[in-house]
Amino acid sequence: MIPGNPSPGADLAVSKHFFSLSWFCGLLLLESKQK
């Protein structure tokens, strides 16, 4: 994501965090829809 990033592991951590965050948001939306 960031050009010239010295550590490629940071991108992986960011994408992993973003994926878990979006998944959590989707779960909350699903819960609110069921109620």
Image (cartoon, helix red, strand yellow):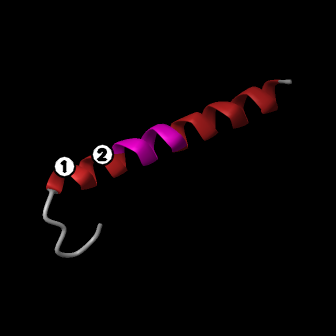
Q: Say which residue label 1 marks.
A: 9
- Does dot 2 land on a helix, a strand or a loop? helix
| Magenta region, residue range | 16-21
Q: Say which residue label 2 marks.
A: 13
Q: Give the residue type that dot 2 points to.
A: Ala
CB-based contact (under 8 Å), mark 1 and mark 2: yes
- Disc 2: CA contacts within 10 A as few (<14), some (14-19) or many (>=20): few
Residue depicted at x 44% and y 48% = 18
**Which label belongs to residue 19?**
none
Vertically, is 33 above or below 35?
below
Q: Is residue 7 left or right of residue 30?
A: left
Relative depth, front residue between 7 and 31: 7
Which quadrant would residue 7 be assigned to in this image? bottom left
Residue 23 locus on image (x, y percent): 52, 37
Residue 14 counted in the magenta span: no
Q: Is residue 33 left or right of residue 27?
A: right
Residue 14 locus on image (x, y percent): 35, 51
